[in-house]
Image: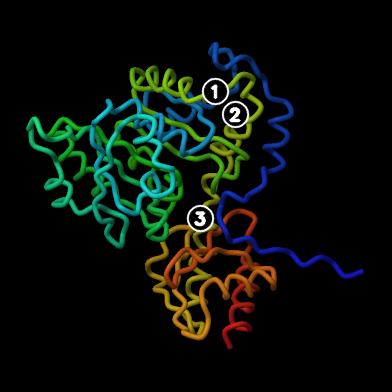
Amino acid sequence: MNEPVKVIDLRSDTVTQPTPAMREAMYRAEVGDDVFGEDPSVNRLEALAAEMLGKEAGLFVASGTMGNLVSFLTHCRRGDEVIIGDQAHSFTMEVGGASALGGAQFRPLPNQPDGTLDLLDIQAALRPANIHYPPTRLICLENTHNRTGGRVLSREYVAAVRQIADRHGLAIHLDGARIFNAAVALGLDVKELTLNADSVQFCLSKGLAAPVGSLIVGSREFIQQARKNRKMVGGGMRQAGVIAAAGIVALTQMVDRLAEDHANAKLLAQGLADTPGIEIDPENVQTNIVIFSLARGDMTPQELENQLKERGVWLFAIGGRRLRAVTHYEILREDILTALAVFCEILN
């Protein structure tokens, strides 16, 4: 009988399965009622997250979308305005929750190719004190930046945004879904990238490979109010230590190895750059997300996606002529080489 062909799943780092250590930790997890603050595993995870990111307190939430939503609800009153990138995940991919549920208004600014917002654009978008205008309350940044290809925002850039925020009495929320990828790519302690944010959301279930969950971190006062807002949107959980235990393993065992994912992404990008019909600059690949364009007119990106899938390589066409591949701990160097061979087979 033929061995089944391994699927090389590059659709997202969210497809990762829990590691054996996570499954063992989940089996043995101490639990209690987290709504009462009595789950020891959740409490440990929240304290660990706050310590690692240099904040006073943490809050475990079900997803990154919930984490961002709860953060917006905590920072903003109804009618407040949030400055955000037009390619930000919170603006494009989270169902308008801050507006629908919190009454906040997004003011999108163009994301630059490196994921930043132009500092002059931010300054110009600030609302003057005028009876006709919604008050600017919050600046939202994203690091790494998904839709610009996993690009990393530097600590110097975030510090410059902090100066603008401080001059105008604004808060900064950092959608750090992949903030540990950014820290590993820059060779920095993650605290250095979160220092200038008032609140940070990061995901356990992407490159860190936990099965579910995200954290919000911030001041004790902020997290106290965020806890109420989490309850309001249905995010209070009971014996959540079963999943929090996997998150502890993610933070203690899975961060440093993200460099392997980055190396595999760079290898993929370099190989694609040498593939006829593909356009990509490997220098723009900084972390684990590889976005490239199909330059051939006789094939659509969707057709390429389908042909790759038939041969066991899964990724996504993401609009226009672009496709996206994401590396993670289940993707090995030899998988990248196999995927590149499949690309050549199809495009040649």
The amino acid type found where label 1 is placed reads: Arg
Rendered location of residue 113, percent (x, y) = 30, 62
Residue beneath the point at 27% across and 25% down = 77
Q: Is residue 23 left or right of residue 278?
A: right
Q: SS at mark 3?
A: helix
Q: Earlier in the sequence, mark 3 or mark 2?
A: 2
Q: Is residue 3 left or right of residue 150?
A: right
Q: Is residue 8 left or right of residue 106?
A: right
- Please report contact status of discs 2 and 1: CB closer than 8 Å, yes or no: yes
Rendered location of residue 345, percent (x, y) = 63, 83
The residue indicated by pointer 3 is: 259
Task: Please tell me in which quadrant of the rendered image residue 348 appears.
Answer: bottom right
Q: Earlier in the sequence, mark 2 or mark 1?
A: 1
Give the label on residue 244, or none: 2
The residue indicated by pointer 1 is: 44
The amino acid type found where label 2 is placed reads: Ala
Q: Earlier in the sequence, mark 1 or mark 3?
A: 1
Quarter of the picture holding the N terminus = bottom right
